[in-house]
Amino acid sequence: MPPCGFRKRGVDALIEFGEDSLRLLQLEIEAGKHSTIETGLEHEIAQMERVLAGDTGQSESFCLEATFGALIFTLRFYKDLLRKLRASTSTRFEDMADAYILELKDELEKLHIDEDGNLVERPT
């Protein structure tokens, strides 16, 4: 990450990546692959954890290192959504996910690593 943190364009790209991953999961649910958003998130989390732990076969033409960051981001994104879903008592999943995405975007826009390597809020 650059010392100044993420630019707006980079934050927007990460948010779009997360939203698109979630849209694809919702399409799988609509197609009947998973019975609920919770079971879909659980399945995807387990799959990503297996891949990241090296517990799966890997094609010689596939480079895990090239996609590691995307897998870690998606894994954390899904884990956060699952945790929020389980803690929610009345909020629709879509509303909860939208609120989380806005919160994530706000945090990413503030992200900054100072010269000493400390994670701090971006100076204004």
Image (cartoon, rainbow, N blue to C red):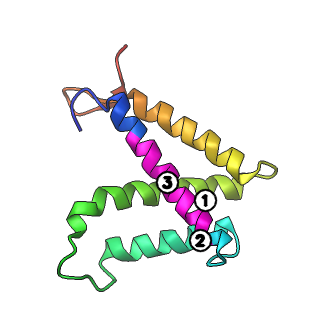
Give the CA separation, mark 1 to mark 3.
17 Å
Q: What stretch is highlighted in magenta?
A: 13-28
Q: Position of residue 90 (x, y in %)?
A: 82, 50
Apparent side of residue 25 relative to residue 120 in the rendered image (left or right): right
- The quarter in which the C terminus is drawn is top left
Apparent side of residue 90 relative to residue 18 in the rendered image (left or right): right
Which residue shows up at 29% across the image and 86% down it? 57
In this rendering, the answer to whether 69 lies above or below 27 is above
Apparent side of residue 6 relative to residue 97 in the rendered image (left or right): left
Name the mark on residue 28: 2
Viewer-closest of 68 and 16: 16
Q: Where is residue 58 in the image (x, y as percent from the top left)?
A: 26, 82
Which residue shows up at 36% across the image and 61% down it? 71
Residue placed under numbered mark 1 in the picture = 82
Question: Which element carries disc 3, helix, strand or loop?
Answer: helix
Residue placed under numbered mark 3 in the picture = 20
**Sequence-wise first label, 2 or 1:** 2
- Graded by Cα atoms within 10 Å as few (under 14), some (14 to 19) or many (20 or more), the crowding at tag 2 reads some
- Graded by Cα atoms within 10 Å as few (under 14), some (14 to 19) or many (20 or more), the crowding at tag 1 reads many
Farthest residue, direction right: 90
Give the CA separation, mark 2 to mark 1.
16 Å
Question: Which element carries disc 1, helix, strand or loop?
Answer: helix
In the image, residue 27 lies in the stretch drawn in magenta: yes
Question: Which element carries disc 2, helix, strand or loop?
Answer: helix
Give the CA separation, mark 3 to mark 2.
13 Å
Farthest residue, direction top: 124
- In the rendered image, which quarter is residue 25 located in? bottom right
Dominant secondary structure of the residues highlighted in magenta in the image: helix
Which residue shows up at 28% across the image and 62% down it? 67
